[in-house]
Image: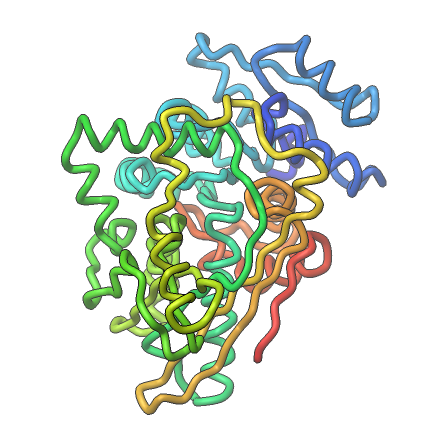
Amino acid sequence: MADREFDIIVYGATGFTGRLVAEYLTNNYADGSLSWAMAGRSLTKLHEVRDEIGAPADTPLLTANADDPQAPLALAARAKVVITTVGPYQLYGEALLAACVTAGTAYVDLCGEPNWMHDMIAKYQADAQASGARIVFSCGFDSIPFDLGVWAAQQAAIAKFGKPAPRVKGRVRAMKGTFSGGTFASGKATAMAAAKNPSVFKVLLDPFALTPGFSGPDQPKGVLPEYDDAVGGWVAPFMMAVINTKNVHRTNFLAGHPYGEDFRYDEMMIAPGIGEMGKAAAEAIAKMNPMNADKGPAPGEGPSKEERETGFYDIAFIAEMPDGQRVTATVKGDRDPGYGSTSKMIAESAICLIRDVPADGRGGIWTPGALMAEPLKARLEAKAGLSFSID
């Protein structure tokens, strides 16, 4: 791919998250070391966004007509890696993914739609391996902090105990942030797909839906409030667990089960308060699900700049050994999880693919943790406001 015109094409640059990605590249890679372009359906809107984010006037703008079946392939053939923020992916994503597979182009997205990921793995894994295309799903808050958090906890367990932990608990200690119209639309699209096709429910409920041919032990359900001795308090269901847990198990699967074939993992939120107050808080959190609302933000809408910059997250990954010993990895982010932090994570994931991860022999459909855990962790700490520590 050395002869490709661009290092990166940001597809969906006029959308809420795509704009943030383009702005991040503008502000952090203005030294000319990275060749990149903004792509979308409307040239007029691309001009507007380029000017509004302060991108150089010569930043290339590419249009891709949604009605032209050849447009995605023409786009993919010009880049080493395509960043796509255009969702819901189950409605709008397959043509570009297929084009990247055909062209042998690396691809990163923000997909949190396990039903679509399941179908794409079945349909394109072999072709991606053959073409050398490195397809990496879920390169945002779902699921990089969780995928790499479990990886960091297991690295610490191996260093301390000489072997991986058969049980890791992901526990969200604190989080401040809102969600955008794109996230709401993806959630609604998944719910509609499940209503039309009962097999989608099976995928959503199966922790090993993304590990074809492998099914591990029964997993903690994480659907009811419970008291957790590991954190000394009550915990409640976490809405992103349905996708994050599947990606963590796929990482373990793709890497040859370094966490063990008996690995068990769940994610929950730590409720504020102690005793009965903590229990009541956990029960209240369990009843809250913004995706159940009839109306949410419209596509293109999302948190304000102030909301993004004052947001944060703090997540613990507790690796438990059979004898009760524990080691904890902590992942923190310095922006709101869904957008301020996500836009930095997906941009650095794309750059990691072209600068830090050799392409030869690595074609296929990946998770961030299975393909680039160590170099991506280093890049996110250096550039994207994430921190990893061992307690």
Q: Position of residue 7 (x, y in %)?
A: 66, 36
Q: Is residue 90 above or below residue 30?
A: above
Figure check: 296 above or below 28: above
- The quadrant of the rendering that contains the N terminus is top right
Q: Residue furthest front?
A: 276
254 vs 10, left or right, is left
Q: Nearer the viewer, residue 325 or 41?
A: 325
Q: Is residue 124 visible?
A: no
Q: Residue at image x 45%, y 42%?
A: 135
Whether residue 22 is situated above or below residue 384 in the rendered picture: above
User: What residue is at 22 percent from the left and 52 percent from the top?
Assistant: 206
Q: Residue at x 48, y 61 (%)?
A: 172
Residue beneath the point at 28% across and 42% down: 118
Residue 302, horizontal then vertical, whole percent = 58, 31
**Residue 144 image point, x, y percent:** 51, 54
State which quadrant residue 387 falls in.
bottom right
Q: Quadrant of the C terminus?
A: bottom right
Residue 375 spot, x, y in % from top left = 61, 61
Residue 320: which quarter of the image?
A: bottom left
Q: How is the image coloured?
A: rainbow
Q: Is residue 140 visible?
A: yes
Please tell me in which quadrant of the rendered image residue 200 appears.
top left
Residue 75 higher or lower than 342, as above or below: above
Give 237 or 193, whichever is nearer the viewer: 237
Front-most of residues 129 and 139: 139
